[in-house]
């Protein structure tokens, strides 16, 4: 079996202490944890790196987590990327709804329960892996269908050529 490739998980928070705590909590997953201390830095990372999941602090200066999520979702490459919002501020039902409308797949409040955060991230990383595997299988099937279609078309062309040759010889034999 092929060695499992580590998935990239982007951690976005303007507070270094919180980034470090998420890193410690998620280290057990044995994935690549990429830290960004601002929305701008997160966008720069996303331009260069494919990620399985993004943890985003809701309250950040300049661009907040909702604005960042909206920008991420506007790019077709990230339409299915899991975005998990994290907030130390108790969000109202409307804020939670906004989080989902902005493309969030889940919401975690602070203080973060380590086991819960790990479980949520693990689920989205597993979904990411399964989606990539399905894409690979689908690409392989499409390639095989094209190859078999080409072989079938070649066989049909050969059969038609043979049929014309047999017909031609039969007409010549009858003419004699």
Image (cartoon, rainbow, N blue to C red):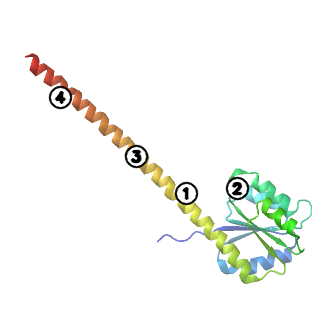
| Residue depth check, mark 4 versus mark 3: number of the one nearer the observer | 4
Q: Which residue is identified by label 1?
A: 135
Query: From mark 3 to mark 1, how far is it between C-alphas?
Result: 18 Å
Is any part of residue 40 visible from this angle? no
Q: Which mark is on residue 3?
A: none
Query: From mark 2 to mark 1, how far is it between C-alphas?
Result: 15 Å
Q: Which residue is identified by label 3?
A: 147
Q: Residues within 10 Å of mark 1 (few under 14, many from 20)?
A: few
- Mark 3 vs 1, N-terminal side: 1
SS label for mark 3:
helix
Q: Which residue is identified by label 2?
A: 79
Q: Which residue is identified by label 4?
A: 166
- Mark 4 vs 1, N-terminal side: 1
- Mark 2 vs 1, N-terminal side: 2
| Residue 25 versus residue 99 in the image, above or below | below
| Residue 48 versus residue 162 in the image, above or below | below
Query: From mark 4 to mark 3, how far is it between C-alphas?
Result: 29 Å
- Mark 2 vs 4, N-terminal side: 2
Where does residue 54 sit, x and y in percent of width and height? 74, 66
């Amino acid at each position: 079996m092929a060695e499992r490739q580590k998935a990239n998980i982007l951690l976005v928070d303007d507070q270094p202490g919180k980034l470090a705590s998420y890193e410690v909590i998620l280290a057990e997953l044995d994935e690549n944890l990429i830290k960004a201390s601002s929305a701008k830095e997160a966008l720069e990372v996303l331009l260069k790196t494919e990620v399985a999941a993004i943890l985003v602090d809701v309250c950040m200066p300049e661009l907040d987590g909702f604005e960042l999520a909206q920008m991420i979702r506007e790019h077709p490459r990230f339409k299915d990327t899991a975005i998990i919002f994290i907030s130390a501020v108790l969000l109202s039902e409307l804020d939670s709804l906004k989080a989902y409308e902005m493309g969030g797949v889940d919401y975690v409040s602070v203080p973060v329960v380590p086991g819960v955060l790990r479980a949520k991230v693990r689920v989205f990383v597993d979904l990411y892996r399964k989606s990539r595997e399905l894409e690979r299988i689908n690409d392989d099937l499409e390639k095989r269908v094209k190859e078999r279609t080409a072989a079938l078309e070649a066989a049909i062309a050969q059969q038609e050529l043979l049929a014309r040759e047999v017909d031609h010889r039969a007409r010549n034999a009858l003419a004699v």
